[in-house]
Amino acid sequence: MSSLEQSPQRIPVTNIAPFLGGRDEDKQAVAKAVAQACEQTGFLVISGHGMPQSVIDEAIASGFAFFDQSAEIKSEYHPTGNARQRGYHGLETRGLASTMDKAAPKDLRESLFLGPVDDHRATYARIPEAETAYAPNIMPSNPADYDKTLIDMYRGFERLSADLMRIFAVALQLPEDHFAGMIDKHFSIMSTHHYPALIEPPKPGQLRTGAHTDYGALTILAMTDASGGLEARMADGRWIPVQAGRGELVVNLGDMMQRWTNDRWVSTLHRVVTPEKLDDAMSRRLSIGYFMHPNYDAEISCIPTCLEAGEQARHPAITAGDHIRTKIEKSHKG
């Protein structure tokens, strides 16, 4: 655990249903609340999002069942070649602290990754580097119907991320459809992360997930509640717990959104801590995250409404694909 004082502060819940209802005054009210959270913490807990709880519950139950299988069976779904963001990855194979150029032991989690369900490879055949971003998925056959469950969850997150990008556009005083043409061929990743109860002490400085910021535009998280959970670092240096209740989801901004907004909105450092007690059987945890990565060739450059008179853009323009590729390469080297 961090030596920093733990703050009692919690991330407030924002109901986005009024925005989705369509009335302009409701849209503006939700967008204002979202903009405030994006500027101050970069994290939201949302309700009224439209994701069926039954889909979330099934994805979590099937996820636990998948990770309960032997290492030999799970390893059958490990990717080969360049498809790094697909299939199964075992414990201590990645270290997200390295994406921040920090030296730390690799993370105490195992993961199953799913990429885009729609096939956009032909669109980006002219860009050889995009091959990895649009690689075919590696779908597990156990437990029964897990492949369908994963696709249902991905599709739900996909719809919600498009809704959130509409809310973000209004919050940034842009047309509601501003981002639509930049995300219609996205290469978003959905990851199911399993944090098993520990059976031996972690290495010095080792966390379930090392402190990092997310790579993309936004992240949506569904998670179980257990000791040793998600924490976000506030501007005053304190780490606060982040947990959604039933029917709620966590949303946080990624580096691309911070670049788009010229640092007006913040991509906040966060981590998943190790449980305080090694023998805490209740510390087993599972989270399912959707990492919104726009179209591979989408330009990430300063949005005009985020540039004050006489102000310069703080970040050079970069494509979404180049940005993500650099971050992933760092995570594997760490």
Image (tube, grey):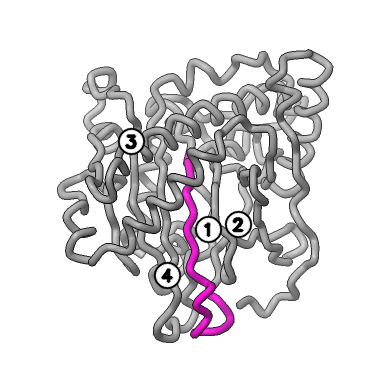
Q: Label 1: state its secondary structure.
A: strand
Q: Which residue is mark 3?
A: 148
Residue 116 in the image, given as x and y percentages of width and height: 35, 32
Give the magenta-colored segment's residue range: 275-291
Cα–Cα span, label 2 and label 1? 5 Å
Count the marks. 4
Q: Label 2: state its secondary structure.
A: loop
Mark in front: 2 vs 4: 4
Residue type beneath disc 4: Pro
Work out whether residue 245 or residue 99 is closer to the camera in this orientation and state it. 245
Residue 214 in the image, given as x and y percentages of width and height: 51, 48
Magenta stretch: includes residue 279: yes
Residue located 23% across and 58% down the image: 74
Residue type beneath disc 2: Leu
Residue located 63% across and 25% down the image: 303
Q: Which residue is mark 4?
A: 196
Q: Is residue 5 above or below residue 112?
A: below
Q: Are marks 2 and 1 in contact (CB under 8 Å)?
A: yes
Mark in front: 4 vs 3: 3
Cα–Cα span, label 4 and label 3? 24 Å
Give me the disc on residue 269: 2
Mark closest to the chain's N terminus, 4 or 3: 3
Cα–Cα span, label 2 and label 4? 23 Å
Work out whether residue 143 or residue 13 is closer to the camera in this orientation and state it. 143
State left or right for residue 265 relative to residue 189: right
Cα–Cα span, label 3 and label 1? 31 Å
State left or right for residue 171 relative to residue 49: right
State left or right for residue 132 relative to residue 221: left
Residue type beneath disc 3: Lys
